Amino acid sequence: MVKLRTNVDKLVRMSVMGEVVSPIVSRAAYKVTADGRPVVLPGVGGITYNVRVGDLASGWEADHVEPGVSIENKEEDKRFPEGPNAALNILTCVGNEAIVASGDAKGAKGTVTGKHGGIEHVLTDFQPEAMEKLMLQDKILIKAFGVGFKLLDLPEVKVMNTDPRLLEAMDPKIVDGKLEVPVTHKAPAVAMGSGLGASQVYSGDYDITLFNDATKKKYGLEDLRLGDLVAILDADHSFGRIYKEGAVSVGIVVHSDCVIAGHGPGVTTLLTSSKGAITPRIDPKANIARLLQLRKL
């Protein structure tokens, strides 16, 4: 085994800001499931009091539910209309510190646990007592840190969306020229849906579809948990999300299962190797809730 050398001393730590956003429901209310049933379910946004990282990703009466506290930057910039929220989503990394900057919960500290594409939310985890005090539109400061993170002795592996303290907690090792990484599950590229083909993976996620029972059973995906580290096989995320035999990507499960065709528990990328220089090692404890001691499981 080889000790990891990184460029952590060269990374920039920068403030970005978001606010707690309201849940969103279309006026039509109904969503049509992959088997043709109209349903009305809670979804993205808001403060989700009883769903946090560490909880099961499936089984909820919900669609795309985001655990903990969902934030977005609603600041307007005439030059770059999407710029402030894009900065929040791209510069923020999983594991970054989140600090409540306004309202009754001011001063409470939490942790970034993922990013949700399409809606472009950053997801944060706070202790229950802080979430009880939080209100919609409260400001959340993120100390963004991790963009540009590199493994100096293993350039075949790209790091993205990862705070150095999360990588340290994962405790990966270089074994036989590859990065051995703990994951709770492996998922095949054939199961991946929404988000495939995105041109960059420094924000957003893509979904593990769970509609095929045989695939779900073969890979043990029934018990995926929010916050799980998972390996996506034959998936290269170096410059977007593509299918590539032999490539391996590792990400974190960021939102719940979904009823809509092509969707499922979302995964934000943390590591990728187009040359397969990542060895996933199954470890049932490889969940951010345990790794960063966010809650007892």
Image (spheres, rainbow, N blue to C red):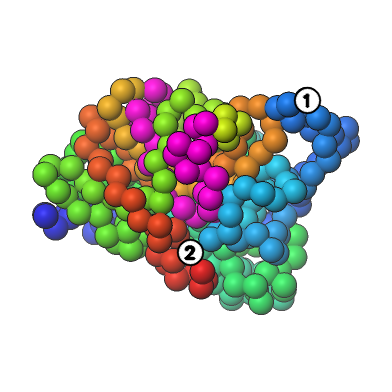
Circle 1 — which element? loop
Along the horizontal axis of the image, is 16 left or right of 176? right
The kind of residue on which mark 1 rests is Gly
Q: Tell me whether the residue at label 2 lies in contact with that at label 1, contact meaning CB atoms closer than 8 angstroms.
A: no
Residue 11 in percent (x, y) is at: 30, 54
- The residue to which callout 2 is attached is 289
Report the residue at 55% width, 45% height from top: 222
Judge the density around disc 1: few (<14), some (14-19), many (≥20) Cα neighbours within 10 Å. few
Q: Is residue 242 above or below residue 270?
A: above
Q: Is residue 168 above or below residue 224?
A: below
Does the magenta portion include 111? no
Does the magenta portion include 223? yes
Q: CA distance from mark 2 to mark 1?
A: 35 Å
- The residue to which callout 1 is attached is 36
285 or 76, which lies in front? 285
Displayed quadrant of residue 35: top right
Residue 262 in percent (x, y) is at: 61, 27
Q: Kindly tell me whether residue 4 is visible in this rendering.
A: yes
Which stretch appears magenta? 214-243
Residue 76 in percent (x, y) is at: 66, 43
Along the horizontal axis of the image, is 11 left or right of 176? right
123 or 217, which lies in front? 217
Report the residue at 11% width, 55% height from top: 1
Q: Is residue 176 above or below residue 53?
A: above
